[in-house]
Amino acid sequence: MQLEGIKVLVVEDDPVFRQLVSDYCTQLGLVVSGAEDGQEALERFHDVEPDLVLVDLCMPRMGGLELLQVISRIAPGIPSIVITGNKAMSDVVEALRLGAWDYLMKPLTDLAVLKQAMVDCLRETGDVVEPEEPAIPGWEDPGQSIEMADNFDAIKHDTQTAALIQAQLFPESSQRRQGYEFGYNLFRSTPVSDRLCDGFECGERYYCAYLAKLEPGGNLSAFVSVIIRSFFNQKLKRYRQGGSEAILDPYAMLSYLNEQLVKSGLGCTLDIAYLVLDRVSGRVAIGRAGGQIKLYLRSGEMLSPLALPESPPVGQSSWSQPNCHYRDLASGQALLLLEGATIARESAMAERFTGLQDDNQGGACLQLKASA
C-alpha cells in the first residue's frame, strides 16, 4: 500500500472525529498517534517523529495556527494538512502561509478525499512514489484536494472578505538584505487587485520574485492568489528539503503553474514574469509568459528594455513554452518590471515602494536590485 508504515500525528480536540480519522488512517496502513490539542502535540512531537501532521485549527490551550508556526520553525521538512470546520478563510490563508500543504473542510463526507490529500502531500516530500507518470514530469498539484466550490462561492459573493484575504498574501512593500533590494507597488482600481506579486528568499543564495496580471479580475483574483501562493510555497518547501530545484528554474515553474491553472477549472489566464536572483554571482534567470509585463534593466535613472518575445499567458490548455532569459546584474543595477498606467513607472523611478494602493488607473511595478 502507498501509505504503509507512514507515521501520522492527528491533532484534533473532538475525540469522536479524532478517532474516526485515526481509525481510517490505521486501515490505510499508517502508524497513527493522536493529540487533543497543539500543546500535547508538541509534547509528543519528538517521540512520535511523524512523517505527516493532520491538524485542526480551533483547539484549546494551543490552536492549529500556533502549532504550525512552531513546527515550521523546529521541523520545517515535516508536511501538514489542515482539517477544519473553521469557515474563516483568513485563518486558512494564514495556515498556508505557515507552510500547511493543503486544507480540507469538515465534515469530511468522503474520507477518500483525505487519503488522496495525504498521498499527494507525501508524494511531494518523496515518502510516497507516484505510481504513474504525471502529465508533466515532476508536476505536483498542491491544491488538488481543496474544497474549491464552497470557498470560491464564499469569496465570489463577499468582496470585502476577498480583499482582506488577498491583502494578507502580499509581501512587505520593500525588503533589503545582503545581496539584494526588493520593492513593489500594486495600484488597484477595484477592491480586489488583479495584479499579484511576491518576493521570497530561497535558501541563503537565491531570491525569487514574480509580478502577475490576472484576467478576468474581480473577486476571482483573491482565490487565484491563494492557489498561486500555495503552489510557490510547496515548491519552496520541496527545495528546502533537498528534493527539487524546480523553483530556481523559471521555465519549469511557469510550465507547472500553467498546468495548475488549467486543472483548477477557473477559466483564468495570467501574464507573469518570474525572476530568480543568484545573490552571489548577480546572475538573474528570467521567465515571462504573456506580453503585458515589460522588463527593463535599470542603471540609475537609465532604463534599457529587455527584448523578450511575447508568448501566451499561462492558464491555457493549448499553451506553448514561456520565454526565458539570463542577465548579469552589477552591484546597483536592477531589473524593473512594469505593467499598466504611467503611475507605476513614475513611482518606481522615484523608488517609492509602498505596496498595495488604490488608484483608478491601475498598474504595477516590481524592482529587484543587486547590492553589495
Image: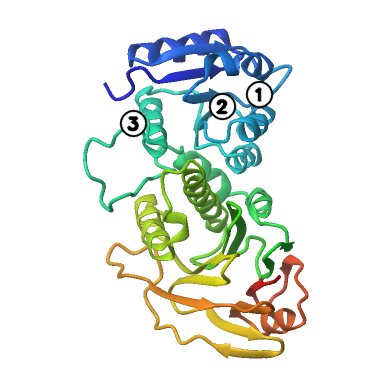
Quadrant the C terminus occupies: bottom right
Q: Position of residue 263 (x, y in %)?
A: 35, 51
Q: Which residue is mark 2?
A: 84
Question: Of discs 3 and 1, which sits in the foreground?
Answer: 3
Please tell me in which quadrant of the rendered image residue 209 appears: bottom right
Q: Is residue 261 left or right of residue 227?
A: left
Quadrant the N terminus occupies: top left
Dot label at residue 182? none
Please tell me in which quadrant of the rendered image residue 333 appears: bottom right
Mark 3 vs 1, N-terminal side: 1
Give the Cα distance between marks 1 and 2: 8 Å
Determine contact: label 1, label 2, CB under 8 Å. yes
Q: Which residue is mark 1?
A: 58
Q: Is residue 129 left or right of residue 126?
A: left
Query: Residue at left 27%, top 66%?
Result: 318
Query: Residue at left 41%, top 73%?
Result: 324
> In the structure shown, which secondary structural element does the residue marked by tag 3 occupy?
loop
Number of other residues with Cα within 10 Å of mark 1, as a class: few under 14, some 14 to 19, many 20 or more:
some
> In the structure shown, which secondary structural element does the residue marked by tag 2 occupy?
strand
Mark 1 vs 2, N-terminal side: 1
Q: Which residue is mark 3?
A: 128
Q: Is residue 320 left or right of residue 273?
A: left
Q: Amino acid at mark 3?
A: Val
Residue at the farthest left position = 132
Q: Amino acid at mark 2?
A: Thr
Question: Of discs 2 and 3, which sits in the foreground?
Answer: 3
Q: Is residue 35 above or below residue 91?
A: above
Q: Amino acid at mark 1?
A: Cys
Give the Cα distance between marks 2 and 3: 24 Å
